[in-house]
Image (cartoon, coloured by chain):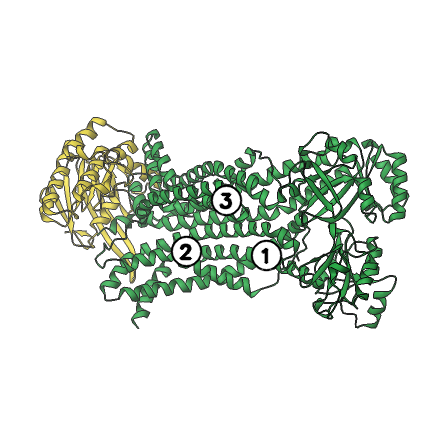
Amino acid sequence: MLLTVDAVTKTYPGDTGPLTVLDAVSLSLSAGESLALMGESGSGKSTLLHLVGGLDTADAGTITLNGTVITGLDDRALAELRRTQIGVVFQQFNLIPSLTVVQNLAFHARLAGRLDETWVNTVSERLGLTTVGARYPEQLSGGQQQRVAIGRAIAAKPALLLADEPTGNLDEDTADTVMSLLVDLTKEANTGLLVVTHSQARAAALDRHLTLSKGSLA
Amino acid sequence: MMTRVVLQALLSHWWRRPLQLVTLLFGLALATGLWTGVQAINQEARSSYDAAAQALGQGDFDRLVAQGGALIQRQTFVDLRRAGWLVSPVIEGRYGRGEDRVTVIGLDPFTLPPSAGAPDLSDDNDLAQWFSDDGLIFVHPETQAALPDGLPRAIPNLSVAIGEVVTDVTTAWRLLEVDGFSHLIIAPQQPIGLTPLDDLIPSLERVRPDPAGDIAQLTRSFHLNLTAFGLLSFAVGLFIVHAAIGLAFEQRRGMFRTLRALGVSTRRLVAVLAGETLVLAILAGLLGIGLGYLVAATLLPGVAATLRGLYGAAVPGTLSLDPAWALSGFGIALAGAAAAAGQSLWQVAKLPILAPAKPRAWAMAMDRSQTRLALAALVLFAVTVVLLIFGSGLVAGFLLLGAFLLGAAFLLPWVLSRLLRLAAPLARGPITQWALADTRQQVPGLSLALMALLLALATNIGVGTMVSSFRLTFAGWLDQRLASEIYVTARDSQQSEDVRALLEGQADAVLPIRSTDIRLEGQPAQLFGVVDHPTYEQGWPLITALDTPWAQVASGQAVLINEQLWRRADLTLGSELALTADWALPIVGVYSDYGNPEGQAIVAQAELLQRFPDVSTLGYAARTDPAQVEALRAALIDIGVPAGNILNQAEVKTFSLDVFDRTFLVTAALNVLTLGVAAFAMLASLTTLAGLRLPQLAPLWAMGLTRRHLALVELARAVLFAAITWALAVPLGLILAWVLLAVVNVEAFGWRLPMFPFPFDWARLAIWAIVAALLAAALPAYRLARIAPAQLIKVFADER
């Protein structure tokens, strides 16, 4: 199993006492499998994604990625994990504005120390970015920027790719294209894919979907 | 009501960002403080010059002086009074040595015009003592603290100028060992039907009052220098304010749009923002005036030492509070805030109501201005070249410097961007690649702070090179010039004969020091008489000379002049210099004479003594084996010469270099202050930009860079910026030094100095610049290293 989330709990301090955002949530994901995480706003989807991505730490429970228990790792180890095992795609793309498209695509792979030029070119081609390689992010459309963000994550060959509303800023047609590219490329790379989305249509393109409600799986 | 609501909304920005508010206030206060401080110092000095010029009516009344600066005979005064002219005699001369030297002014209280400010002699005891053999003197309380020995009882009097001693003419004659008057004051109201002065005494010249006085004229350049420094500091401070206000406006663009959409008129919005700026300027102005007072009070003793050392001008070492400079401080704070906010207010006035709610990237907006700034720089460089070719005078020199420095500062962002773009392909690892690309993108946001740093560094290098070159030249010149091994000043003319006899018996050569104050080419000057001795030929560095200048001087047929007189009066070799009404000699050489504000000329001593029989005969220099100096000193003390009146060569050099170093203490202090302001500008910019940078840094953290790693990159970036700016500041500073040495110094002091490089000083400055940058980046970097991951995650969470 690529990813195992076991009874993970997360609380935040609230105005009227601790607020439980995730309550003993458990799930699992295999390599090359895709999973949609759905739920209303505030249900804990993004929090779960952040915990799995080593961006935040759980209060209870364990998360195991590729056989390594990541809950309890220190800051440095978590950074190492994010650099080498995980790719993240955000709603707002979060590209590096000072680097060109080509440099952005290769960036995470170079950080992870496993740049494969052929694979980066393949990804770039599949995403239709070859003609805009020399441009800067601000010179691209929203759809193009999100494709660069996906390409950056996949080019690093992570074991697990996390996407938080990756199509939230795109129109329906572009969102469909981007999502199918995401699914296809992760399948090709045998990468696990965990996507947070509000959209039933987007979720339908993935292998499985789970719904969170008030911090628990429905 | 609506205004209050709008104001509340606008001010909420500052509540959320107190550090930005502090930055803005402190930046404007610093700028105002340094400007106000310099103005306060100038004002204090000018008041002193005015007091000196006004004392005893010298600034208000016409005077009669003898041509060539000779003394007026007593009989001339008597003749004029008998002819009905209401004139009053004054004798002026210098008494004492070194730091304690004072100007003795002897006057006759009975003949002084009523408005001339005669000392108060209403106390019978004082009156009696005034006319007694012992005499009585009036001095400023500050002068009283360090009077030379041998003066009569002193009464403190605030109306006497600092450094001056007022006494009766007969007491002054005794102290100065002269007989006669320096000038006669002419009362403004005279009886009708008098014989014209030209008919009565054609040898005397009537001189109109000089409201500014010689000292004010001489020190004009020094004060202009200080003002230029003040302006520079103000400009550096303005960069901070401009950055802080510009950023605050950009951050609130969304709020402005919302307020406009909710029905607030553009006019009201602009008015409230202008009001906000005004309140901030008033607060900063108050703080700045306080800072200015502190700066002035701290620097004034140094300035007073400088003015005393360079010009012999007496200025009090303590500061009095003057509303004039406090008001000017307020004015400059308001003007500075208006200048910094003007552009932003204009943009708000023109802001379309449907402008994007997302704040336009401030840095990106600044990027567009890079090209405009570079073009402005070219215009300023063109102005520099025009001034270099066609400009003349001190003001043109400073304008040239200003245009050049500002042009260089304007060009900096463009140059930095191009340099970083050129360096980008050299990056090997992804982090270096990102850091370089990201650094280039940070240039616009930091450009104002970096411009301030460039100005401060270039000024440090330029002024430092000037001062160090000056010191090196001065020390070398002292080594040559102070060839004699021992210098003695006898207590009186009787002892002078004993000293001469002793020196002639024990030293290898005796070189009597004889001089008198005169006016040459309309300027105050000293005329020295030297004996024929190879010491002068070997030791006095001549800038330019005809053949055998010393031999011609020794024969009484020629005169040597110092560089100051040569440049100021535009004299040429071979031309005749009028020394007195009936004595003119050809100029055969020009010698450098650093540290002396006045013109000077050298003639044969015999000629001097013949023309000016009253000159002081107390000073001697002597050549001897250095090993014999102590024995000679002991022998001189044995015949009653005070130990303090005997100086060996090393002591004179140490004293001279000490005066020199103290003279430039103020410059060093202002250098440090300007660098401090620039460091603050960097701190301000980095701190305020840090908040804007989180969205750019959070993805990197998400991709596996630790917060500590990111913080280190931020520190490295600050170091890189400081290092590049320093590297650019070095050539800029050297050009500045050249202009200071070759243009400004010649105009200000009358001497031109060779320029020497001081790489060690530049290296030290590089370290300081990097330390300043590290300190400025330390707080934002520390915060980044310790930022809660939740804050970084929030960047992504905020997306929805």
Q: Which of the two labelled residues, at mark 3 and mark 2, occupies the earlier sequence position?
A: 2
Q: From the viewer's perspective, is A59 left or right of B90?
A: left
From the viewer's perspective, is residue B82 above or below residue B527? below
Q: Residue at x 49, y 57 (%)?
A: B32
Q: CA distance from mark 1 to mark 3?
A: 29 Å
Chain B visual colour = green
Which mark is nearer the camera, 2 or 1?
1
Q: Report in which chain the residue with disc 2 lies.
A: B
Q: Report in which chain the residue with disc 3 lies.
A: B
Q: Which of the two labelled residues, at mark 1 and mark 3, occupies the earlier sequence position?
A: 1
Q: Amino acid at mark 2?
A: Leu
Q: Amino acid at mark 1?
A: Ile
Q: CA distance from mark 3 to mark 2?
A: 45 Å
Q: Disc 1 marks which residue? A: B41
Residue B540 at x, y percent in the picture: 72, 34
Question: Around disc 1, counting alpha carbons within 10 Å, would you say few (fewer than 14), some (14 to 19), or many (20 or more)?
Answer: many
Nearer to the camera, A187 or B276: B276
Answer whether residue B150 is visible to the viewer in this image.
Answer: no
Answer whether residue B757 is visible to the viewer in this image.
Answer: yes
Residue B49 at x, y percent in the picture: 65, 58
Determine the secondary structure under disc 1: helix
Picture quadrant of residue B535: top right
Q: Amino acid at mark 3?
A: Gly
Chain A visual colour = yellow
Determine the secondary structure under disc 3: loop
Q: Disc 2 marks which residue? A: B19
Q: CA distance from mark 2 to mark 1?
A: 32 Å
Q: Disc 3 marks which residue? A: B391
